[in-house]
Image (cartoon, grey):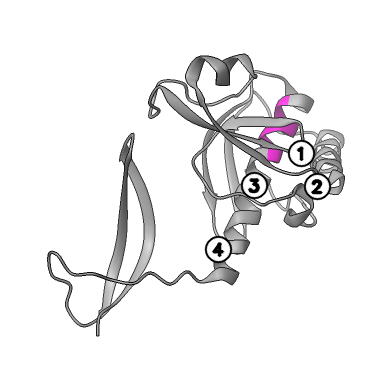
Amino acid sequence: AVKVRVDDTVKPRAGMHVHRGRVLQGEVSVGATLTLQVDHARRQAIRRNHSATHLLHHALRAELGEHVVQKGSLVSPQRLRFDFSHNRAIAPEQRRAIEQRVNAMVLSNAASVVKELPMSEAKAEGAIGLFGEKYGERVRVVRLADDSVELCGGTHVARAGDIGLFAIVGES
């Protein structure tokens, strides 16, 4: 028997998904058929944290200004880290306002809406993203809590309330 733990999935170009992992048991050969089994608890935790990055991005832009742009992120089952550009540290009252805004979106418990649209329609709907960088002519648009609209191919919660409590625990 073969056992492979998938550690990451990358999309080197539009339409291609590559799984990176480690062979834990047996040997993998070209043409072999493998059965995938998802760790549902881990996946749900990642889903919550990934969706929270979208709400955080929206809240940061709303509270600090539209100049705030995501520069990267880390999403794990335990936490999220959100990298962004801004010209100064966040003041304590801004931090509280950001947390309150995210938690208000979570408490709204709005259904998530995922659509595949032509790029021009996504832009018209107000979707934000790194346009043209890694997307084809049709893009996946994720709307969370009625407020956050972004281009994203990732996994998301069904409803904003699935995220649970949100708190900023540090800034650097």
Q: Nearer the viewer, residue 91 or 8?
A: 8
Horizontal arrangement in the rendering, residue 138 relative to residue 144 (left or right): left
Whether 13 is drawn above or below 77: the answer is above
Q: Which residues are magenta?
A: 55-61
> The C terminus is located in which quarter?
top right
Residue, disc 1: 145
Residue type indicated by callout 1: Ala
User: Mark 3–mark 1 contact, CB under 8 Å?
Assistant: no
- Looking at numbered disc 4 in the image, what kind of residue is underneath it? Arg
- Kind of residue sitting beneath label 3: Ser
Q: Give the Cα distance between marks 1 and 4.
A: 20 Å
- The secondary structure type at the circle numbered 2 is helix
SS class, disc 1: loop
Identify the main secondary structure in magenta.
helix
Q: Are marks 2 and 1 in contact (CB under 8 Å)?
A: yes
The reply to whether the C-beta atoms of the residues labelled 4 and 3 are less than 8 Å apart is no
Q: Is residue 17 left or right of residue 145?
A: left
Residue at far bottom of view: 1
Measuring from the top left, give residue 131's x and y in whole percent: 46, 21
Residue 106: numbered disc: 2
